[in-house]
Image (tube, rainbow, N blue to C red):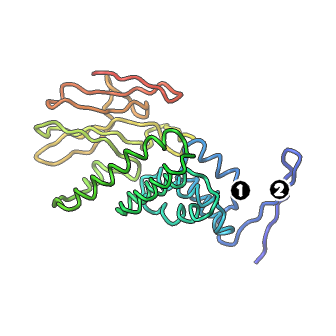
Amino acid sequence: MNKHFTLLLLSGFTSLCVAQEDGLTKVTPEEAANKMKVGNYEDALTDYLQLLNEDSRNESYNYNVGVCYLNNSMNKSKAVPYLEIVTRKEKHDPNADYLLGRAYQYANRFDDAVLAFKKFKADAKGTVFNLVDADLQIQHCINAKELMKFPVDVMFQNLGSNINSEYSDYYPFVTSNEAFLIYNTKRPEKNAEKMENGNYNNSIYISRVVNGEYMKASPIGAPINAGNAGMEVIGLSETGDNILLYMPEGLGKGKYLYQ
C-alpha cells in the first residue's frame, strides 16, 4: 500500500504527518488538549483514545480520557479503568483520586468510591472545590447504599423521534394536566453554527399533547426564545403559566428571567 508523507514547517519546527492505514488522521497531544480546553470532550475523547493506542501507559492520556468520559453524556463509569491506571502510580495528579471516586459512583461501586474520596482527603493536595466536595460525595455514597436496599420498580422510556434526538436533550418539564412538554435541546437549527466545544447553542422546544400523544416538538419561538439563542428553561409552574428561564451572558455568567 502506498503511503503519502507531507512535510509541514510550522513556527520554526518540523512536523511529519502520516496518513494512517486505518483511515484516521493522526492527532497530536496539542490538538486533543485544545479540544478539552474549550469543553469539546466528545472529540477530545476520540483523540485521546487514539493517542492511547500508541502509548497505553501514558498518565496524562489516561487521566484525560477519564475526564472526558466523566464530562460526556455516555456511560461515565467507563472512566474507571483509565483513572485506576493513573492512581496506581506513586506520584500522580491528586485530583485523579477524587475523579476515580466519582467514576466508581457511576459504576455503583460505592465502597470503592468512599475509599477513593477518603484517600483524596487524606492526601489533601487536590483543588479546593474537590476537597470540599469529597465530604458531600461520601455522604451521597452512604445514602445510595441505603436506597439500594429498597429498590423501586421504575421504567425509563424514550419518547421517540417526535421528542428525542441524537443531540443533548435535557431538563424536561410538564404541566400538571400534561397538556404540553418543554425541554432544552442542543440540536442544529437552520443556519446554526457549531461551537468550539462541539455543541450547538441551546434551544427551548415544546411539544403539545393531542389525544394522549406528544406532537412533533419544535422551537418554542417568540416571545420566549428563538432557536439556538442559548437561553435555557430551568423551571415551569404547575399550570404552565410561568416559565423560569436562564439567559447566558458569557464568561460563565448569566441571569434568571421569569416569563
* Lateral position of residue 28 relative to residue 87, left or right: right
Between residue 255 and residue 226, name the one nearer to us: 255
Residue 43 locus on image (x, y percent)? 56, 53
Residue at (40, 26) in percent of width and height: 247
Q: Amino acid at mark 2?
A: Ser
Between residue 104 and residue 215, name the one nearer to us: 104
Image quarter where the N terminus lies is bottom right
Residue 171 locus on image (x, y percent)? 31, 41
Residue 75 visible somewhere in the drawing? no
Q: Is residue 257 above or below residue 214?
A: above
Residue 17 visible somewhere in the drawing? yes
Between residue 128 and residue 250, name the one nearer to us: 128
Q: Is residue 178 above or below residue 63?
A: above
- Helix, strand, or loop for circle 2? strand
| Proximity of marks 1 and 2: CB atoms separated by less than 8 Å | yes
- When asked about the image quadrant of residue 53, the answer is bottom right
Q: Which mark is residue 19?
A: none
> Seen from this angle, which residue lies furthest front?
122
Residue at (70, 50) in percent of width and height: 30
Q: Amino acid at mark 1?
A: Thr
Q: Which mark is residue 15?
A: 2
* Lateral position of residue 96 relative to residue 229, left or right: right
Q: Is residue 136 above or below residue 14?
A: above
Residue 159 locus on image (x, y percent)? 25, 53
Residue at (27, 41) in percent of width and height: 172
Q: Is residue 208 above or below residue 252?
A: below
Alpha carbon distance from label 1 to label 2: 10 Å
Q: Which mark is residue 28?
A: 1
> Seen from this angle, which residue lies furthest right?
12
Residue at (29, 21) in percent of width and height: 258
- Badge 2: few (under 14), some or many (20 or more) residues near its Cα, within 10 Å? few
- Badge 1: few (under 14), some or many (20 or more) residues near its Cα, within 10 Å? few
